[in-house]
Image (tube, rainbow, N blue to C red):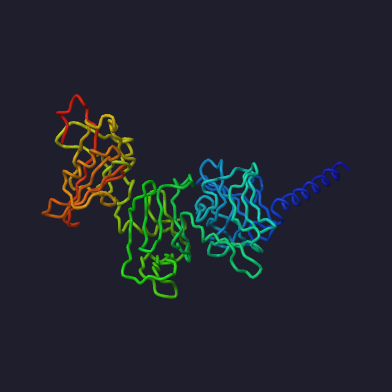
Amino acid sequence: MGVNFVSSVLILSFIFFIFHSQNLISAQPYDYPTAKLSTSWFNHLSAPPHTVHFGDGSIVTPVLLRGTLGQRFACGFYCNGKCDSYLFAIFLVQTNSISHIVSPTVSFPQVVWSANRDHPVKINATLQLTSEGDLVLRDADGSVAWSSKTAGKSVAGLNLTDTGNLILFNKQKAVVWQSFDHPTDALVPGQKLVEGQKLIASVSKTNSRVGLYSLVVNDRGIFAYIQSTPQPYYDFYLSGVEKSNKPNYVKFLNGSLNFYLHTSEPSEPTHTIHIPPASSEQYMRLESDGHLRVYEWKYKWEVSADVLTGFSGDCGYPLVCGKYGICSNGQCSCPGSSSSTVRYFRQVKEKYPNLGCAEITPLKCSTSKYQSFIELKDVAYFTFNFSIANTNVNKCKSSCLKDCSCKAAIFRHGWGSKQGECFLLSEVFSLMDHDSEKKHYNSTVYLKVQKNSIKRSAFIN
């Protein structure tokens, strides 16, 4: 009798668990690529087999998964690092023949899109495809962290395609909203980056919030910026093409990044950057160091191309050596003078020269009369947007000294000429060695420094 009673209780508990779980996810199988209206998903770690822990510290709770046997796209809750907050994201994961996620110690989830990068949610957050057709992410306290804003737009369902595009569609299967129109920091093969859109890098691999670097397309070409100013560190101008009303875009394909400027498919691209063709899954990401890298699956995720480096070089990135650091053949050092024992800059951390340099004595507007320059010959900057044209070096330096916000002056001139262009900087990122013979012009950087008012005679003018 006692055994039968216990068995009955266990059966009832199991039925309750199944019923309760189906209520949480509206009976939606976790490995199914589509969902109907009025479906909800619950971010909870105690709901196996949905939640998967990976060797890199990341955790995913997928709600939709497309395909079997190999690297496949899934979408759901994702975290990395401390996992005290989560994104609703699309990610690549390794699957077996029955759509189970496998290889958690090698095949870490690769996030290619996220909805709420600046508004991460907690455990017990919910994702709901409402009866009105809105896809809504709510935090544990019920507040809205993100919404597709498609309520009342005749949405009939949700679909994750085999190309990694999350689509809200209507009864005619037409797209009402799609993740491809809202890129974050990555592109997958077949995806476009259209004029008006941006790729914006994350702060770091474990911090998904918006970082410093962006990549955009406009009516002149494609450009990569460091956001704070902003200043371009990569520019690819496409000139001599006839303008049209068609939107400009680049399209990522296996083996190429195609530019369509004032034209569109099926026309031939205006320009193509060739990328090593992949025999397996791949994606492209603008990363926290400003690099645009292409990744390919080869039993683990490996870098197959570094798209911008071929144009910019290893030293052509704004913070490759941190602020004030000088990059030479990939090595970082601080500005100094071989003819003086006076030091004006020190490494932020001696063991990590790539973190940059700091002023030993900070610049102060109130003591500007004790400011001057150290001269760095054959040194350049990652960009040059002249502040003063057709000037000489003395006027360039004088303009910087008179401007409290100016921290450096860069003077660039042709061989045999004393006239040139002057670029005034209010913020100094990484500097780099300059080869005047290759570039066919001279470049000198004048860094403004704060002199010791007592030992002015020791200073270099």
Percent coordinates x, y for residue 51 in the rendering = 61, 49
The image quarter containing residue 73 is bottom right
- Is residue 258 shown left or right of residue 137? left
| Residue at horizontal 59 percent and vertical 56 percent from the top | 148
Which quadrant, please, contains the C terminus? top left
- Is residue 325 shown left or right of residue 96? left
The image quarter containing residue 238 is bottom left
Percent coordinates x, y for residue 54 in the rendering = 54, 48
Q: Residue furthest right?
A: 1
Labels in figure, total: 0
Q: Nearer the viewer, residue 204 or 157?
A: 157
Percent coordinates x, y for residue 50 in the rendering = 63, 51
Residue 165 at least partly seen: yes
Q: As displayed, is residue 375 above or below residue 342? A: below
Which quadrant, please, contains the N terminus? top right
Percent coordinates x, y for residue 47 in the rendering = 66, 48
The image quarter containing residue 64 is bottom right
Q: Nearer the viewer, residue 356 or 149?
A: 149
- Is residue 457 shown left or right of residue 155? left
Q: As displayed, is residue 91 above or below residue 120? A: below
Q: Residue furthest left?
A: 416
Q: Nearer the viewer, residue 380 or 48?
A: 380
| Residue at horizontal 39 percent and vertical 49 percent from the top | 227
Residue 297 at least partly seen: no
Q: As displayed, is residue 414 above or below residue 122? A: below
